[in-house]
């Protein structure tokens, strides 16, 4: 009798015995999508199915296995230990099968998202060689949490986030540390010249208008807390909707602000902006590169991911 290779449902000792002998691949695909997305609702558009259909398919697989796969929560689902076992066994074969099904097809565009300023200053310039080599990009800008929620629903392949995503559903790696600088136009810098000690500088800056992108002053407050060891008590003179607008206002002489080095280093080099303070340890914010589960079946996603990781070494 000729030996035959085990199928996906039979590939795992223990787990394979508890799956149907010829498990429906569509049910396993739906299971893996829900496992990765964390909700039936988020998995549905990625599968091209309705949410009730996804729910029905998971129930069918649970009936076939005689085991509960997910614990229903108020927001989403939590995989059971048995579901973790199944996912560990079927994810590789299903992803490989998806890659084979895509062979010969036009490679899909890479859906990339992140903060507007970082995309413009660092990310897109780093990806220019790939675009010239045929990689298609669909780029979205926004805040971390909404972008990560959209990733869970299958909208983005890669997200650059200013904080690590919660939970285990999304894989992330540190990409780079962004340094923050206290800056003003040369005219305002002259007003505080020579007052480099923390107490003197903080007192001097009370007479200088502050420019920020939000009323709660998140970046400036953090600088005061980590560098000066003080709570910021000043109010913003100008709030504008993004860091590019903050840079423009400060460059035009509106006052001072705290900005990422990547955004303002050209202005500092040309003398349009002046560094007001040089702490021994400037505040840093770690950027994370987050990848959607299953996105690696698109080889262009891997090219973009690896290019960004190499480029980030010099950021």
Image (cartoon, rainbow, N blue to C red):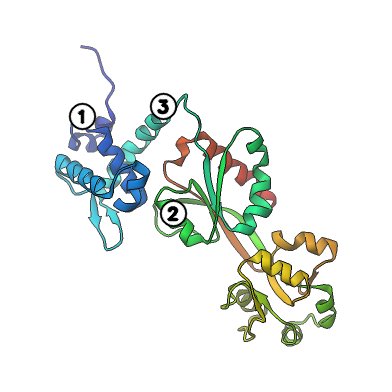
Q: CA distance from mark 2 to mark 3?
A: 27 Å
Horizontal arrangement in the rendering, residue 299 relative to residue 15 (left or right): right
Q: CA distance from mark 1 to mark 3?
A: 20 Å
User: In the rendering, at what x and y percent does residue 45 appear?
Assistant: 36, 46
Dot label at residue 22: 1
**Classed neighbour count for the residue bearing mark 2: other residues with Cα under 10 Å, few (<14), some (14–19), many (≥20):** some
Query: Which residue in the protein does label 2 denote?
Result: 150
Residue 133, quarter of the rendered image: top right
**First reached walking from the N terminus: tag 2 or tag 3:** 3
Name the quadrant of the N terminus: top left
Q: CA distance from mark 2 to mark 1?
A: 34 Å
Could you tell me which secondary element the residue under label 3 belongs to? Answer: helix
Query: Which residue in the protein does label 3 denote?
Result: 100
Would you place residue 89 above or below residue 140 in this image? above
User: In the rendering, at what x and y percent does residue 249 appear?
Assistant: 72, 71
Residue 180 in view: no
Could you tell me which secondary element the residue under label 1 belongs to? Answer: loop
């Amino acid at each position: 009798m000729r030996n035959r290779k085990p199928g996906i449902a039979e590939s795992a000792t223990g787990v394979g015995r508890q799956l149907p002998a010829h498990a429906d691949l569509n049910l396993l695909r739906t299971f893996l999508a829900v496992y990765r997305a964390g909700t039936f609702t988020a998995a549905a558009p990625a599968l091209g199915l309705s949410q009730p259909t996804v729910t029905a398919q998971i129930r069918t697989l649970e009936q076939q296995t005689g085991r509960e796969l997910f614990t229903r929560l108020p927001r989403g689902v939590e995989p059971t230990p048995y579901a973790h076992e199944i996912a560990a066994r079927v994810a590789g074969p299903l992803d490989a099968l998806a890659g084979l099904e895509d062979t010969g097809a036009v490679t899909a565009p890479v859906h990339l998202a992140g903060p507007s300023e970082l995309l413009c200053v660092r990310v897109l310039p780093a990806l220019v060689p790939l675009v010239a080599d045929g990689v298609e990009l669909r780029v979205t800008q926004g805040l971390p949490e909404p972008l990560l929620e959209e990733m869970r629903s299958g909208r983005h392949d890669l997200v650059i986030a200013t904080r690590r995503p919660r939970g285990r559903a999304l894989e992330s790696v540190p990409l780079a540390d962004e340094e923050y600088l206290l800056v003003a136009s040369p005219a305002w810098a002259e007003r505080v010249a020579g007052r480099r000690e923390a107490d003197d500088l903080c007192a001097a800056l009370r007479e200088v208008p502050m420019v920020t992108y939000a009323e709660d002053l998140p970046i400036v407050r953090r600088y005061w807390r980590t560098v000066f060891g003080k709570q910021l008590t000043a109010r913003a003179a100008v709030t504008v909707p993004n860091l590019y607008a903050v840079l423009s206002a400060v460059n035009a002489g509106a006052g001072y602000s705290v900005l990422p080095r990547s955004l303002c280093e050209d202005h500092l080099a040309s003398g349009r902006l002046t560094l007001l303070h040089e702490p021994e340890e400037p505040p840093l914010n770690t950027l994370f590169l987050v990848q959607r589960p299953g996105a690696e079946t698109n080889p262009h996603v891997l090219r973009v991911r690896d290019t960004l990781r190499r480029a980030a070494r010099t950021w």
